[in-house]
Amino acid sequence: MDAWWHEVWLTLMAEFADITDARQITRVSVRLLMAALLGGVLGFERERKGKAAGVRTHMLVALGAALFVLVPQMAGAGEAALSRVVQGIVAGIGFLGAGTILKGKDMDEEHVKGLTTAAGLWMTAAIGVCAGMGREATALLSTLLALIILGVMPWVVGRFEHPDKDSD
C-alpha cells in the first residue's frame, strides 16, 4: 500500500512541476498579475462610465490572453506556433466584442452602440498578450495610451462639435 501512495505522490509532484524554480514562478506571477491589473485599469474606466463590460470582464480578458500566450511559450513553442495562438485570441475576442455591439433604430435614425466597448476589449486582449509574452513595458504604455483615448478624446471631440441646428 505504501508503494501505491508513493506513486500517487510522485505523480502529483510531476503534475505540478510546470513551475520549476523561483525565477520561473516570479516570471509567471509578474506577467499574469500585470495583465490582470492593466485590464482592471481599463475596466475601471469603462465601469465608471456605466458601460456593461467593466473591471471583471476586462481583467479576465487580459488574464486569459496572457495565459494563452504564456503557457505555449513556457512549453517551448516556436514563433510560428505563438503566432497562431495570437491569431486565435484575436478571432475569439472578435466574437466576444461582437456580442457587445447593438444596432438599433431610434425614431428615423439608426444608431450603433458598443463599438467602443468592443474595441476596448480587443485592446485589453492585446495588452494581455503583451504582458503574457514578457513585454510589460509595452503593455503599460499601451494601457496609458488607451486611457488617454478613452478619457481625453471625448472631451476633445466635444470641444469641436457644432451645436445642433435645431437649437438656433
Image: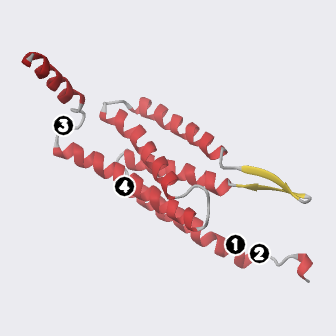
Q: Distance from label 3 to label 4 (Cα)?
A: 21 Å
Nearer to me, 64 or 141: 64
Horizontally, is 162 left or right of 11 in the view? right
Q: Distance from label 2 to label 4 (Cα)?
A: 37 Å
* Above-or-below relation of 7 to 64: above
Residue at label 1?
Answer: 157
Q: Quadrant of residue 152?
A: bottom right
Residue at label 2?
Answer: 161
Residue at image x 36%, y 40%?
A: 70
Which amino acid type corresponds to the residue marked 2 in the rendered image?
A: Glu
Residue at label 3?
Answer: 20
Label 2–label 4 contact, CB within 8 A: no
Pointer 4 or 1: first along the chain: 4
Pointer 3 or 4: first along the chain: 3
Secondary structure under tag 3 reads: loop
Q: Distance from label 2 to label 3 (Cα)?
A: 57 Å
Label 2 neighbourhood size at 10 Å, few (<14), some (14-19), many (20+)? few
Which numbered circle lies on residue 34?
4
Seen as rendered, the residue at the extreme left is: 2
Label 2–label 1 contact, CB within 8 A: yes
- Which percent across, then down, holds residue 137? 37, 58
- Which percent across, then down, holds residue 71? 35, 36
Q: Distance from label 4 to label 1 (Cα)?
A: 31 Å
Residue at image x 37%, y 30%?
A: 78
Secondary structure under tag 2 reads: loop
Which amino acid type corresponds to the residue marked 3 in the rendered image?
A: Thr
Seen as rendered, the residue at the extreme front is: 1
Which amino acid type corresponds to the residue marked 4 in the rendered image?
A: Met
